[in-house]
Image (cartoon, rainbow, N blue to C red):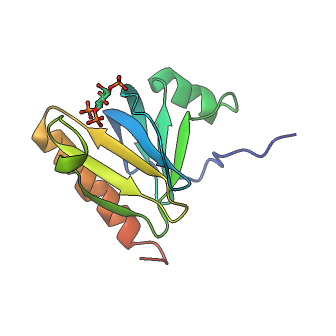
Amino acid sequence: NWPQLWDGHMCVLKEGPLNRTKMTENGKRLRKNWTTSHVILTELFLLFFKDAKSFIAMKNGNGRPELCIDLNGALVQKADKMSSRKNVYVISTVLRTQVLFQNDCNIQAESWLYGIQAAISNLPCS
Ligand code: I3P
C-alpha cells in the first residue's frame, strides 16, 4: 500500500497551466527540459500534473503528480538570468531543488508568483 498525497481536505489556492522545467535536484544542475504542466497550488505543495485530467484522477485515488514541491521554507524569485524566456521565476526548496516556471503572459506569471509567495509566507519555516 502506498500513502495518498491528497486527503480530501487540501485546499486548492490556485490552478492552471504553466511552463516549467526542473533546473537543479539535490543541489545538482540538470539539463533543462521545458514542458507545460497543469499546476496546483495548495497550502503545503506546488504540484505539477501532466494535464487537468491527471489531477482529477489523483483526487479519485489514481495517479500522482509528476512533481511535488514542498513549499515550507522555499523561496520564489525572478529568474531573468536563468533563462532566455520571458517572465521566468525560480522556486528553490530546502532540499536544494530548483524549478523554473514561466508564462508568456506577464500578468499570469506574476499572479503565480504572488500566490506562491503568499503560501510560503503562511508556512512555519518562512
Ligand atoms: C537548452 C534548451 C533550453 C534552454 C537552454 C538550452 O538546450 O534550449 O530551452 O533554456 O538554455 O541549453 P538543449 O535542448 O540542447 O538542452 P531556456 O529556454 O530557458 O533559455 P541554457 O543552457 O541557457 O539554460
Q: How many marks?
A: 0
Residue at the (72%, 44%) spot, across then down = 4
The quarter of the displayed image where residue 104 is located: top left
Q: Is residue 115 above or below residue 118?
A: above
Q: Nearer the viewer, residue 85 or 18?
A: 85
Would you say 108 lies left or right of 72 here? left
> Whole-percent x and y of residue 110?
18, 49
Q: Nearer the viewer, residue 71 or 90?
A: 90
Q: Nearer the viewer, residue 112 or 14?
A: 112
Q: Nearer the viewer, residue 36 or 83?
A: 83
> Whole-percent x and y of residue 13?
38, 51
Q: Residue furthest right?
A: 1
The quarter of the displayed image where residue 60 is located: top right
Residue at the (39%, 33%) spot, across then down = 32
Quarter of the image that includes the C terminus? bottom left
Would you say 4 lies left or right of 35 here? right
Task: Name the quadrant where ligand 1 sits.
Answer: top left
> Whole-percent x and y of residue 8?
62, 47
Residue at the (49%, 53%) spot, across then down = 97
Q: Is residue 17 above or below residue 80?
A: above
Residue at the (38%, 25%) spot, across then down = 35
Would you say 105 lies left or right of 8 here? left
> Whole-percent x and y of residue 22?
44, 40
Quarter of the image that includes the N terminus? top right
